Structures are given as structure tokens and as C-alpha cells.
Amino acid sequence: MSSPPKVACQNCVHFRSRPYEAKFEGCYLEKNMPSKQKLLCLDEQQLPGNHVKINLRGDCPDHSARAKKPSLWRRLLAIGA
């Protein structure tokens, strides 16, 4: 029986880090958040879940990998440069 692969929070869709993505660093999956807001204008008041506790053993059940960023060359071609 093989164990599931270890996952890193920084590679998850639900993880947001400061200062660019969120005010507080953590897991922004709704079921892991102690405080969440319905209105988009109140997004700053949300409190994320503690990603260290959630992924303590590296086996987060809610991990969803982020989409891989295209290369710089492909991004430049996409904008027509």
C-alpha cells in the first residue's frame, strides 16, 4: 500500500500569500475558513484557515494543483509582441 504523495500548500489553488494575493497568508477554501464574507466588497475581512495545521503531514485532502504558467515566450506570443 503506497502513501499519497506529499503536497505543498504554495502549489494549491486555495492558498493565497501576502502581499499581492491576500492580506493574510493561508488556505482560502470556504470550509477551512473560520471567517468568510459573502460580498466581494468585504473580501478584506476574511480570515483564512491555518495552512500549516491543515497540511501538517503533507496530505491535504482538499489540495488542487495550480495551473502551470505558460513560458515567457508563449505569453509574449499571446499578446502579439
Image: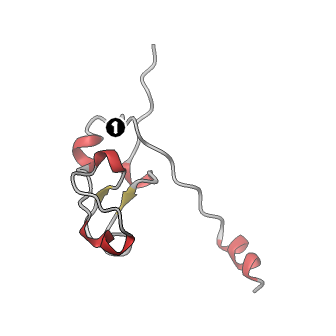
- Which of the 4 image quadrants contains residue 3? top left
Label 1 sits on a secondary structure element that is: loop
> Residue extending furthest front?
39
Rendering coords of residue 48 (x, y %): 26, 57
The image shows a total of numbered marks equal to 1
- Which of the 4 image quadrants contains residue 72? bottom right
| Nearest to the observer: residue 37 or residue 29 | 37
Seen in the image, is 40 located left or right of residue 36?
Answer: right
| Nearest to the observer: residue 35 or residue 62 | 35
| Nearest to the observer: residue 80 or residue 71 | 80
Residue found at x 36% / y 34%: 59
Tag 1 residue: 58
Tell me: residue 57, above or below residue 65: above
Tell me: residue 66, above or below residue 61: below
Seen in the image, is 30 located left or right of residue 52?
Answer: right
The C terminus: image quadrant: bottom right
Q: Give, as a three-letter code, the residue at label 1.
A: Gly
Seen in the image, is 44 located left or right of residue 1?
Answer: left
> Residue extending furthest top?
1
The N terminus: image quadrant: top left
Residue found at x 25% / y 39%: 56
Q: Residues within 10 Å of mark 1 (few under 14, many from 20)?
A: some
Rendering coords of residue 23 (x, y %): 27, 71
Rendering coords of residue 68 (x, y %): 59, 57
| Nearest to the observer: residue 45 or residue 58 | 45
Seen in the image, is 67 located left or right of residue 23?
Answer: right
Residue found at x 29% / y 34%: 57
